[in-house]
Image: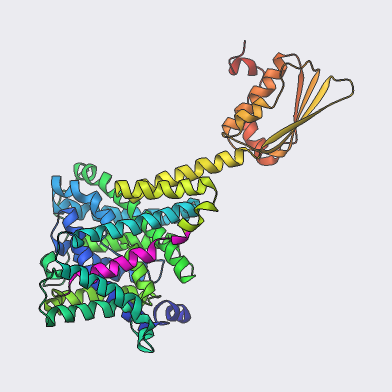
């Protein structure tokens, strides 16, 4: 127990504290921007980011991952806030948390094993593109100072690690933010800053129960939004957890992460914050800056509120160009450049799934739709591929009156038609043996195909023997098959 706490909290103290500070700085403009997207006061997003980050540090299943208010969730809140107001958003946030906790207890986090690597890669690339696109408003219709500061920031981020000794001690994104802020203040450069994004809170969040009637009508209003928020939040969180697993080469508990996200959202809703989830951009910043344990996530949340309440005057002077440089670094680091280089080597189906996921996510700005389309495509390609591994061969005895068909492979909805087409129903035979020793029947479509084959042969006057079914296949055939029923021909509509 003590060793586990040591590993998850205090095994990388300096790296976690510094990474948490960098993440806190990057969280502020994003939380404000996402609040504006959702149509609520900037304080709502900032309170949510503080609460979610602090709570998830203790309850989450992926140490070192950053959760806060996100753009994907904010997009789903727009119509609820517009039509019903903030109080209903807070109620929806609480219900979102309840649904996510339920998903954790139902072990839905385990469903991540059905998401193929090509879908994850497409998800990552799409997020990298969206992160970059989100910076474009800060780089359009601006003075040359903004471009110069952004370029200088990128230079610091990528070159500072090469500075002897100190380059390895301090995270370059933090050095970038501090350096450009000092330059902007000393030279009095007229440039857009964090202070221009909106008013910052001046008090800690307080307990706030949503002022909505506890009726079925309220539930009918908030449930569709809560269900969408829960699904998108878990999808983004679990996908991000998978990415951080790869970056750190460590495992995570996906079902615990589901519960943790739910608890964090309930906490945010009770403190006047909106629903949130894991943030791939900030999580990558955290890992790249040296964050590895829960301490980095806790530091990000606590320091975020310290910055807002204590250092707000300094905070307001941070140039947005510095944070844009950090986020451009994140988008470059997040994008899987190997996926471009491997387009020639990977199977066409893999490339189609990856590219389609990217296109749908970028076009809709909805991660759930993109991932859903990617998973569906991957499943279709997989089913088609497995269907080709089914084959039927046959031998006939010396008299030519008995033929043995040997089926090898998987018989299911994708290969059922191929299974039927492999039989010659017009051949004059006294007996047909269907040997299924090396075959497996998976679904009722496969059982229906077997029924069809057996009854067609019987109509042609042949005796049919089905043998070799394994236990699982025999169970489904006995339960759903009709070829061994007295009125089989009538059931199948024969005449």
Classify the position of the C terminus by image quarter: top right
The colour style of the image is: rainbow
Displayed quadrant of residue 192: bottom left
* Location of residue 12 by image quarter: bottom left
The answer to whether any part of residue 301 appears in the image is no
Residue at image coords 58%, 15%: 493
Where does the image place residue 358, in percent across and percent down from the top left? 38, 50
Residue 330 image point, x, y percent: 33, 66
Residue 190: quarter of image: bottom left
Residue 267 x, y percent position in the rendering? 25, 64
Is residue 467 toward the left or the right of residue 373 in the image? Answer: right
Image point (17%, 51%), residue name: 88
Residue lying at the far top of the rendered structure: 495
Number of marks in the image?
A: 0
Q: Is residue 147 left or right of residue 282?
A: left
Residue span colored magenta:
318-338
């Amino acid at each position: 127990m003590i060793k586990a706490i040591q590993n998850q909290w205090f095994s990388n103290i300096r790296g976690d504290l510094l990474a948490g500070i960098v993440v806190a700085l990057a969280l502020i403009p994003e939380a404000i921007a996402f609040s504006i997207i959702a149509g609520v006061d900037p304080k709502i997003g900032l309170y949510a980011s503080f609460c979610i980050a602090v709570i998830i540090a203790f309850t989450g299943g992926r140490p070192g991952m950053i959760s806060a208010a996100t753009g994907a969730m904010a997009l789903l809140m727009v119509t609820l806030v517009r039509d019903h107001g903030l109080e209903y958003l807070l109620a929806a946030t609480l219900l979102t948390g309840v649904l996510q906790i339920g998903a954790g207890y139902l072990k839905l986090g385990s469903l991540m094993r059905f998401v193929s690597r090509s879908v994850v890669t497409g998800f990552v690339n799409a997020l990298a593109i969206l992160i970059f696109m989100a910076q474009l408003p800060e780089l359009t219709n601006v003075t040359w100072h903004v471009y110069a500061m952004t370029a200088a920031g990128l230079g610091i981020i990528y070159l500072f690690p090469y500075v002897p000794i100190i380059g390895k001690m301090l995270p370059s994104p933090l050095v970038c933010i501090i350096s450009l802020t000092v330059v902007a203040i000393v030279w009095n450069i007229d440039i857009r800053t964090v202070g221009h994004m909106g008013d910052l809170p001046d008090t800690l969040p307080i307990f706030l129960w949503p002022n909505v009637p506890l009726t079925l009508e309220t539930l009918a209003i908030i449930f569709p939004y809560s269900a969408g928020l829960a699904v998108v939040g878990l999808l983004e969180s679990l996908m991000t957890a998978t990415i951080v697993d790869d970056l750190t080469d460590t495992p995570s508990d996906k079902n615990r992460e589901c519960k943790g996200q739910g608890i964090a959202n309930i906490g945010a809703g009770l403190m006047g914050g909106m629903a949130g989830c894991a943030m791939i951009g900030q999580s990558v910043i955290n890992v790249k800056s040296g964050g590895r344990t829960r301490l980095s996530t806790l530091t990000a949340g606590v320091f975020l509120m310290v910055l807002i309440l204590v250092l707000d005057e300094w905070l307001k002077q941070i140039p947005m160009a510095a944070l844009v440089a950090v986020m451009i670094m994140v988008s470059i680091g997040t994008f899987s450049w190997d996926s471009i280089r491997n387009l020639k080597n990977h199977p066409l189906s893999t490339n189609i799934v990856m590219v389609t996921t990217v296109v749908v996510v970028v076009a809709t700005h909805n991660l759930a739709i993109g991932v859903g389309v990617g998973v569906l495509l991957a499943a279709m390609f997989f089913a088609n591929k497995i269907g080709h591994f089914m084959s039927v061969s046959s031998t006939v005895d010396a008299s030519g009156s008995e033929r043995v068909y040997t089926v090898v492979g998987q018989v299911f909805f994708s290969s059922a038609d191929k299974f039927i087409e492999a039989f010659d129903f017009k051949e004059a035979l006294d007996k047909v043996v269907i040997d299924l020793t090396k075959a497996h029947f998976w679904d009722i479509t496969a059982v229906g195909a077997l029924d069809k084959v057996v009854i067609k042969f019987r109509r042609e006057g042949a005796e049919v023997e089905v043998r070799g079914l394994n236990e699982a296949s025999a169970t489904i055939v006995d339960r759903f098959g009709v070829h061994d029923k007295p009125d089989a021909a009538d059931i199948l509509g024969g005449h």
